[in-house]
Image (tube, grey):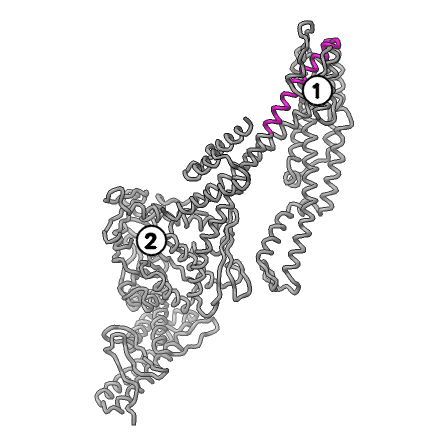
């Protein structure tokens, strides 16, 4: 694993921890964010918006 | 991965150039315009497919494909190729100027990973990068360092998250506006000052009572018309004047004029806050004070911004200033709220006018609606000036009474009267049914917009939380990374400045989009790197930071570094320390070092960064058609001859003087002579030369006495002859010395002939060998034991005169 992959994985874990601290417990949300961070998808506006929209729609249902 | 050989064809200033490196360190030197940059740029192209000179700020009109090709060639013929030793295997890499890469190895060969790694550019440092690391503002430095660390993807993510966060913030504000507009439509219809479920129920039950329906006790759109018998009542809401009437009344009432008092409140607040400009600068002042607080300590005696001394406690002052600004902040926020209130009121007015303008869709009403719709457009433009405080402060805003006075009151009154007459008379049940239908419709709209607003708020909050979590995670990770780099950076800098700043240390800190970089100065606290330290120290910092980053990034992958003219402002002693640093800390790294300074090239050899004169590649006599000429061991005499042959007297004299300065500096250092610096902190050639000659002469006389004491008459005679020759040669140079005197530049060149300069050059060319070994060409030096001079000798040992007399 290269140093950049190390750093990236660590940022993902820390981001999810921070979100959990803020009370977000949805596995689906955290997994989607982790998946997004692990791939180039996170650099894609539509992908992130999709995560946000799905999560919020879920809380409204 | 080490460079073995390089072939450049039709790139930049080289139609054809071949160089051999054999994996060794090399210094490439030559005057400005001799072709050094061509080699650096060709290597850059080879490894990254790009040429840095054509990328980045200020290069908009430059392109690699157009300007990277040799002027006499075409892009198709522009290519650079090199052989690298990769773990004992020689790999040839061919790169065309268009970026096309050719390597004859399988796709899974590690060379591809190494080239991918090379794309971050951590193998190359130029003076431009040194300056950008040190002088950049934090956000720019952040980008440069993240680029170099190959962490750009993380910054790209952060920027993307900011864009999306702003998108959701805008969406939330827009949905809030939509919701408020629906509230206004509903409360306007119900003639209420504000909305509440109870007030709505009162109105609904009033109309239900007319229709003899039972009272409902819940604000629910499905219940509003429940149990109402529609079969006996016919109604048409659009033609019901009572739906429009409340909005005429609202617009024509005094309510609209409340905006004037709000506006006056705004003006008073602005006056109290010392004007629009002062408020606009407020945020910047707060930022400045907070930056100041991070830069000063209890003991700080001068302003970190202007450098002026500060008698009082600066830290306390800044804390007090911050508290004052925080108080002002409260007033600014209150002002922002009033501006938003005015926006909302104007927006409601626009909504009211729009309700009235719906009458224009009714065919049987023949009325001139244009003045009313024109006024609404005017109102919209005025409303937008109150969208936020910054908008309001940055634009000229008329008093609202000027706008309100233009309200077409007559037209509105006429329309009200006309519509009331033209639209059909309805009985009470019809009116009640219309009202309930319209209330239901608007209530449903309001609930929908309210839901939209709630969802938008949730999305914005989630996005804000995600952004904050990402930035916190990124900052934690980067701080850990930077702290390891900062440690090595401080180590390297301390090695370069031994004895001067022993406790130097640095701090690199990630904050949102920026990287804060501070360094200590003589135990006086931490400062930005370009605040206190000299230009030479800043160069050292740039090199140290690069080497720390390079070490972290490469982890032994690309043991190949190009240092392109990076010691521009570093003095001789610190350059010596850099040589030691490169040797000790990077023993397995191949350095390609370019410079215009031959003295630095010699220093690199003297201190063992390069091992022989053949590792000095001198470029000279560049011409468009042929490119640079190359010499691996060219002496400056050849350069002087070239200029003399071309009748270039000025260039020849300058080259001769500079060459002699370098020669005698080296000699003087070996013979341990003391040279005074002049007022420009330079040594003069005259003093260097005279002191070197005197020291050699006195040392030879000492050797002669020693030979005599040991009864070595032949040696004594040899030294005697040598002394005579040396004296004669020195006398010859004294006759000609004026031509190369530093002051010669200020003399008229007409007094100076080619013949005279050639004679001077020949006189010095004859004496210089007396300061070197005839076999190994190294400068003679004096070996000492416990400060006592023992021998005058050379590196190879073939020249070796004893200086110790036989004890009596």
Subunit bearing disc 2: B
Residue at the far right in the pictured view:
B254
Look at the numbered disc 1 and give the secondary structure of its residue.
loop
User: Nearer the viewer's eye, disc 1 or disc 2?
Assistant: 1
Instruction: Name the main secondary structure of what is drawn in magenta.
Output: helix
**For residue B217, which numbered disc appears in the image?**
1
Say which of B517 and B199 sits in front: B199
Indicate whether B337 appears above or below B206: below
Q: Quadrant of residue B19?
A: bottom left
Label 1: how many Cα within 10 Å (few below 14, some 14–19, many 20+): some
Q: Residue at x 36, y 44 (%)?
A: B66
SS at mark 2? helix
Which circle's residue, 1 or 2, is located before the other in the chain? 2
Give B457 or B343, whichever is nearer the viewer: B457
* Structural crowding at the residue carrying mark 2, measured as other residues with C-alpha within 10 Å and reported as few (<14), some (14–19) or many (≥20): many
Residue B350 visible, this angle: yes
Q: Which residues are magenta?
A: B424-453
Q: Quadrant of the C terminus of chain B?
A: bottom left
Q: Position of residue B158 (x, y in %)?
A: 49, 42
Query: According to the image, label 2 marks what residue?
Result: B38
View extreme (bottom): residue: B808
Residue B38 on image: x %, y % = 33, 53
Residue B415's place in the image compared with B322, above or below, is: above
């Amino acid at each position: 694993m290269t140093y950049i992959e190390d750093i990236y994985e660590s940022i993902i874990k820390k981001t999810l921890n921070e979100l959990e601290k803020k009370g977000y417990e949805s596995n689906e949300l955290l997994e989607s964010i982790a998946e997004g961070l692990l791939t180039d998808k996170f650099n894609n506006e539509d992908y992130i918006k999709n995560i946000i929209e799905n999560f919020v729609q879920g809380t409204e249902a | 991965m080490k460079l073995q050989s390089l072939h450049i064809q039709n790139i930049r200033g080289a139609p054809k150039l071949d160089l051999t490196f054999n994996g060794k360190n090399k210094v490439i030197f030559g005057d400005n315009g001799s072709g050094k940059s061509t080699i650096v740029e060709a290597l850059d192209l080879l490894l990254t497919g790009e040429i840095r000179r054509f990328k980045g700020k200020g290069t908009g009109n430059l392109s690699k494909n157009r300007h990277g090709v040799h002027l006499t060639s075409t892009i198709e013929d522009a290519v650079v190729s090199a052989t690298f030793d990769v773990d004992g295997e020689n790999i040839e890499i061919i790169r065309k100027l268009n970026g096309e890469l050719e390597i004859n190895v399988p796709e899974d060969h590690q060379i591809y990973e190494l080239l991918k790694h090379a794309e971050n550019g951590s193998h190359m440092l130029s003076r431009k990068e040194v300056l950008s690391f040190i002088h950049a503002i934090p956000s720019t430095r952040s980008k440069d360092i993240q680029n170099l660390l190959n962490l750009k993807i993380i910054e790209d993510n952060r920027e993307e998250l900011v864009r999306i966060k702003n998108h959701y913030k805008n969406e939330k504000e827009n949905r809030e506006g939509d919701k408020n507009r629906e509230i206004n439509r509903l409360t306007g219809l119900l003639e209420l000052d504000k909305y509440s479920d109870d007030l709505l129920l009162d109105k609904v039950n009033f109309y239900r009572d007319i229709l003899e329906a039972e009272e409902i006790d819940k604000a629910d759109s499905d219940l509003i018309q429940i149990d109402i018998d529609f079969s006996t009542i016919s109604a048409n809401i659009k033609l019901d004047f009572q739906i429009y009437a409340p909005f005429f009344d609202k617009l024509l009432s005094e309510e609209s004029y409340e905006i004037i008092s709000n506006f006056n409140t705004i003006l008073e607040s602005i006056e109290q806050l010392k004007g629009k400009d002062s408020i606009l600068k407020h945020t910047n002042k707060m930022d400045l004070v907070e930056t100041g607080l991070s830069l000063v300590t209890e003991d700080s005696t001068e302003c970190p911004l202007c450098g002026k001394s500060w008698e009082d406690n600066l830290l306390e002052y800044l804390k007090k200033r911050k508290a004052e600004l925080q108080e002002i902040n409260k007033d600014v926020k209150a002002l922002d709220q009033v501006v938003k209130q005015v926006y909302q009121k104007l927006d409601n007015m626009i909504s009211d006018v729009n309700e009235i303008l719906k009458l224009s869709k009714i065919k049987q009403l023949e009325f001139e609606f244009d003045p009313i719709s024109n006024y609404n457009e005017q109102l919209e433009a005025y409303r937008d000036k109150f969208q936020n405080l910054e908008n309001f402060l940055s634009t000229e805003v008329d008093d609202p009474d000027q706008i309100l006075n233009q309200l077409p009151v007559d037209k509105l009154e006429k329309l009200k009267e006309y519509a009331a007459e033209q639209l059909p008379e309805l009985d009470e049940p019809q009116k009640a049914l219309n009202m309930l239908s319209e209330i239901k419709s608007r209530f449903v709209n309001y609930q929908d917009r309210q839901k939209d607003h709630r969802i938008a708020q949730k999305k914005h909050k989630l996005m804000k939380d995600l952004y904050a979590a990402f930035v916190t995670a990124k900052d934690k990770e980067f701080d850990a990374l930077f702290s390891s780099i900062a440690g090595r950076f401080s180590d390297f800098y301390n090695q370069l400045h031994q004895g001067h700043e022993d406790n130097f240390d640095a701090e690199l800190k990630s904050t949102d989009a920026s990287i804060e970089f501070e360094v200590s100065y003589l135990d006086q606290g931490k400062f930005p790197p370009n605040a206190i330290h000299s230009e030479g120290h800043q160069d050292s910092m740039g090199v140290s930071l690069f080497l720390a980053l390079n070490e972290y990034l490469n982890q032994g992958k690309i043991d190949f570094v190009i240092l392109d003219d990076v010691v521009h402002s570093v003095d001789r002693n610190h350059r010596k320390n850099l040589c030691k640093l490169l040797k000790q800390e990077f023993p397995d790294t191949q350095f390609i070092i370019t410079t215009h300074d031959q003295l630095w090239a010699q220093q690199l050899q003297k201190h063992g960064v390069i091992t022989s004169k053949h590792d000095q590649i001198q470029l000279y006599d560049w011409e468009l058609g042929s490119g640079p000429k190359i010499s691996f061991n060219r002496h400056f005499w050849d350069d002087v001859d070239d200029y003399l042959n071309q009748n270039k007297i000025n260039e020849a004299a300058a080259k001769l003087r500079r060459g002699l300065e370098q020669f005698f500096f080296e000699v003087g250092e070996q013979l341990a002579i003391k040279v005074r610096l002049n007022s420009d902190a330079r040594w003069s050639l005259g003093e260097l030369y005279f002191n070197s000659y005197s020291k050699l002469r006195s040392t030879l006389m000492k050797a002669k006495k020693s030979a005599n004491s040991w009864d070595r008459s032949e040696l004594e005679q040899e030294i005697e002859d040598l002394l005579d020759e040396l004296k004669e040669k020195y006398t010859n140079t004294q006759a000609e010395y004026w031509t190369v005197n530093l002051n010669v530049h200020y003399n008229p060149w007409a007094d100076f002939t080619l013949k005279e300069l050639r004679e001077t050059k020949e006189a010095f060319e004859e004496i210089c060998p007396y300061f070197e070994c005839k076999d190994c060409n190294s400068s003679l030096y004096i070996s000492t034991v416990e400060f006592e001079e023992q021998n005058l000798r050379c590196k190879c040992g073939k020249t070796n005169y004893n200086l110790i007399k036989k004890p009596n």
